[in-house]
Image (spheres, rainbow, N blue to C red):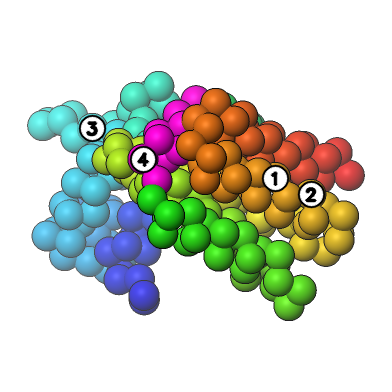
Amino acid sequence: MKRSHQDEIVRELAHEIVGGRRPEGSLLPSDAELMARFGVSRTVLRETLKTLAAKGLIQPKTRVGTRVVERTNWNLFDPDMLRWHLDCGIGLELLAHLSDVRLALEPVAASLAARRRSEADVATLHAVVDRMEAPEASPEMFAAADLDFHLTIARLSGNPFFRTASALIEVALAATFAITTPVNNPAAKAASCEAHRRVVTAIADADDKAAAAAIVETIRAGAARVAAAAKR
């Protein structure tokens, strides 16, 4: 979907803040300066600033101006915030933190999926792994199937909070595959597919502990590939 001019302004200002060009505690330029810079009306600028404020980046104050908020108050669960960090090159450390969050959430989701799955759900997961294993799977196709796999498990957990957290999984996987993919290494691809298949087998067997352990393996394997790529 094409970005609106307002979206582009939000992204540009967010990059300046997240990237450190506008330090914590500093004031943004005045409304008049920003309106002139971007060639927008006061209404558009106000909506832009509202968006940034809602994400915890800035705080407007009457007669003071719009101040950049301390990083500890930023909403890192917001997918846009995560993407902006990655855009600004704050990637490897953030991905490590995202892996920690995934390790806290996804094993529980897999355990719940093992208890609540239907035969149709198991068939769906097997079909997703089939897509990953397909010889013709490109890196993009493999990444899409991998994402579908993890999002499906979040859905099968039956817990709406895990489904909401899917945005974190999506950003983490997209960033991981932007850095490294197992597709170009037959052994790595086979190992990844086998690990995902073990998750499905455990879910099919209603073995919640095995499902949790197996999905931990898939998350740690991705994190290890990123760490190895970073050392090259």
At label 4, the amino acid type is Arg
Separation of marks 4 and 2 at Cα, in angstroms: 27 Å
**Vertical order, 14 against 92 (above or below):** below
Mark 4 / mark 3, whichever is N-terminal: 3
At label 2, the amino acid type is Ala
Q: Is residue 105 magenta?
A: yes
Q: Residue at x 50, y 25 (%)?
A: 104
Mark 1 / mark 3, whichever is N-terminal: 3
Give the foreground label among 1 and 3.
1
Separation of marks 4 and 1 at Cα, in angstroms: 21 Å
At mark 2, the secondary structure is helix
**Vertical order, 193 against 69 (above or below):** below
Q: Residues within 10 Å of mark 1 (few under 14, many from 20)?
A: some
Q: Is residue 187 visible?
A: yes
Magenta range is 104-117
Q: Residue at x 86, y 61 (%)?
A: 186
Separation of marks 4 and 3 at Cα, in angstroms: 44 Å
Q: Residue at x 42, y 26 (%)?
A: 71
Separation of marks 3 and 2 at Cα, in angstroms: 48 Å
> Within the image, what quadrant is residue 4 found in?
bottom left
**Residue on which the image places disc 4:** 116
Mark 4 / mark 2, whichever is N-terminal: 4
Is there CB contact under 8 Å for labels 2 and 1? yes
At label 3, the amino acid type is Gln
Q: Quadrant of the N terminus?
A: bottom left
**Residue on which the image places disc 3:** 59
Residue 155 screen position, x and y as percent: 36, 48
At mark 1, the secondary structure is helix
Q: Quadrant of the C terminus?
A: top right
The main secondary structure of the magenta stretch is helix
Residue 75 screen position, x and y as percent: 35, 33
Separation of marks 1 and 3 at Cα, in angstroms: 45 Å
